[in-house]
Image (cartoon, helix red, strand yellow):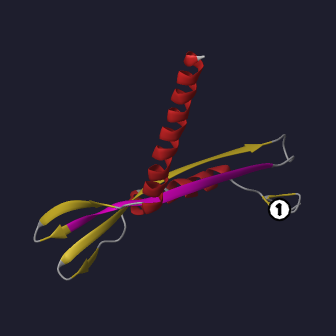
Amino acid sequence: MVDGEIRGRPNMNVQEVLAKAQDTVTVKRVYGVPFEKDGVTIIPAAEVAGGGGGGGGPEGAGGGVGYGVRARPVGAFVIKDGAVHWEPAIDATRLALRGMLIPIVAMLVGRSMVKNIMRRRR
């Protein structure tokens, strides 16, 4: 066994992995690099969330550590002629799913109401 290895595999330092995970979820990930076009500066923004954990067994028996990060665009700050305004990102898929969900719920509620009325008439 080489120093820093367990059963031929590199020994994972939990603190190093968690430090790398923490570096992943930073303000640099939330706000993108500003860019300018035709006198307008755009600063993209995202929602970033992450988490991680680790564990191990008795000495030399194994262990592990991991983390995950999720990011989605939320909009951009637009700077034009010295004025700043927010432009939200529109998630068309999310809007479409919500648009489909409302009629489905309405149909289920309507069905339930009709069943209730029919039971009362008996």
Q: Quadrant of the C terminus?
A: top right
Q: Is residue 39 above or below residue 25?
A: below
User: Can you identify the residue that label 1 sits on?
Assistant: 9
Viewer-proximal residue, 15 or 45? 45
Q: Quadrant of residue 57?
A: top right
Tell me, yes or no, whether the highlighted magenta stretch contains residue 114.
no
Viewer-proximal residue, 17 or 41? 41
Q: Residue furthest left?
A: 81
Residue positioned 53% across, 29% down in the render? 114
Return the x and y of residue 103 as percentages of the image width and height: 47, 45
Viewer-proximal residue, 18 or 6? 18
Label 1 element class: strand
The reply, left or right, for residue 68 in relation to residue 85 is right
Q: Residue furthest front?
A: 122
Residue positioned 12% across, 64% down in the render? 83
Q: Which region is colored magenta?
A: 63-78
Q: Quadrant of residue 118?
A: top right
Q: Quadrant of residue 33?
A: bottom left
Main structural element of the magenta stretch: helix, strand or loop?
strand
The reply, left or right, for residue 28 in relation to residue 118 is left
Q: Is residue 78 above or below residue 60?
A: below
Q: Name which residue type carries label 1.
A: Arg
For disc 1, the neighbor class at 10 Å (few under 14, some 14 to 19, many from 20) is few
Return the x and y of residue 40 as percentages of the image width and height: 19, 75
Tell me, yes or no, whether the highlighted magenta stretch contains residue 74.
yes
Viewer-proximal residue, 31 or 72? 72
Return the x and y of residue 95 as percentages of the image width and height: 42, 55
